[in-house]
């Protein structure tokens, strides 16, 4: 990862996790819904940020704990939008390898979702990492260090298909 060139190489069967993610509700083994989100949006764990992890954890708890259903992807897309975050430096936008995926409630859905407090600053979150064993049943994507330079098509698709709205 940028900034930790002196870090030891990753042991086989392990991935890096971040302390701030676990403080926001991230668990190992990961939930199949999170695994599906990572696959659908074509992102790796480090592309998320602590507030995005919190949104995912709360959504899973809302579905399973309060609604009594498995997390539903169409319901997820009804409430949330995924954006590409870039670092601004000297009046220039730069792509970053970590924390570049923003997950936010859609503005017109804020009053329909339980209120929650998100951190206003997670500065330096990516420097507090450790190794966790990658679970074979629900594996996390391996760290590739790739940059997301453009918004993938899967991020542009939003909302629920008309035929599925009654289910929600």
Image (cartoon, helix red, strand yellow):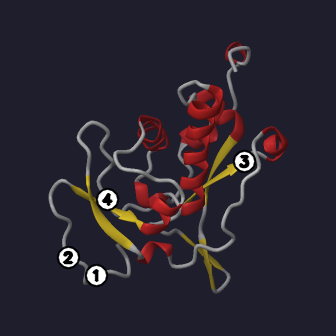
**Helix, strand or loop at mark 1:** loop
x%, y% of residue 87? 59, 74
Q: Alpha-carbon neighbours of circle 3 within 10 Å: few (<14), some, or many (≥20)? A: some
**Which of 164/91 is in front?**
164
**Considering only vertical position in the picture, is 140 above or below 128?**
above
Q: Are marks 2 and 4 in contact (CB under 8 Å)?
A: no
In what quadrant of the picture does the N terminus appear?
A: bottom left
**Considering only vertical position in the picture, is 168 above or below 163?**
below
**Helix, strand or loop at mark 3:** strand
Q: Are marks 3 and 4 in contact (CB under 8 Å)?
A: no
Where is mark 4, residue-wise? 143
Where is mark 1, residue-wise? 5
Q: Please identify the residue farthest to the bottom as the structure is shown.
A: 90
The span from disc 3 to disc 4 (Cα, nearest Å) is 27 Å
Residue 38, by quadrant, is top left
x%, y% of residue 129? 37, 71
Q: Alpha-carbon neighbours of circle 2 within 10 Å: few (<14), some, or many (≥20)? A: few
Q: Nearer the viewer, mark 1 or mark 2?
A: 2
Q: Alpha-carbon neighbours of circle 4 within 10 Å: few (<14), some, or many (≥20)? A: some
**Which of 62/142 is in front?**
62
Q: Nearer the viewer, mark 2 or mark 4?
A: 2
Q: Residue at x 16, y 63 (%)?
A: 11
Where is mark 2, residue-wise? 8
Where is mark 3, residue-wise? 105
Q: Nearer the viewer, mark 3 or mark 1?
A: 3
Residue 92, by quadrant, is bottom right
The span from disc 2 to disc 4 (Cα, nearest Å) is 14 Å
Q: Earlier in the sequence, mark 3 or mark 4?
A: 3
- Is residue 60 visible in this depiction of the protein? yes
């Amino acid at each position: 990862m940028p900034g930790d060139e002196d870090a030891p190489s990753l042991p086989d069967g392990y991935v890096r996790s971040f302390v701030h993610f676990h403080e926001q509700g991230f668990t190992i083994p990961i939930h199949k819904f999170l695994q599906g989100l990572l696959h659908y949006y074509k992102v790796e764990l480090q592309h998320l940020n602590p507030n995005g992890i919190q949104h995912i954890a709360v959504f899973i708890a809302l579905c399973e704990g309060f609604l009594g259903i498995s997390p539903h992807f169409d319901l997820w897309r009804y409430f949330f939008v995924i954006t590409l975050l870039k670092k601004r430096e000297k009046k220039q936008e730069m792509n970053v390898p970590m924390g570049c995926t923003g997950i936010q409630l859609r503005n017109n859905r804020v009053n329909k979702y339980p209120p929650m407090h998100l951190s206003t600053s997670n500065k330096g979150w990516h420097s507090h990492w450790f190794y966790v064993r990658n679970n074979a049943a629900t594996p996390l994507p391996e760290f590739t260090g790739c940059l997301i330079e453009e918004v993938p098509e899967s991020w542009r698709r939003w909302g629920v298909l008309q035929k599925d709205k009654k289910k929600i």
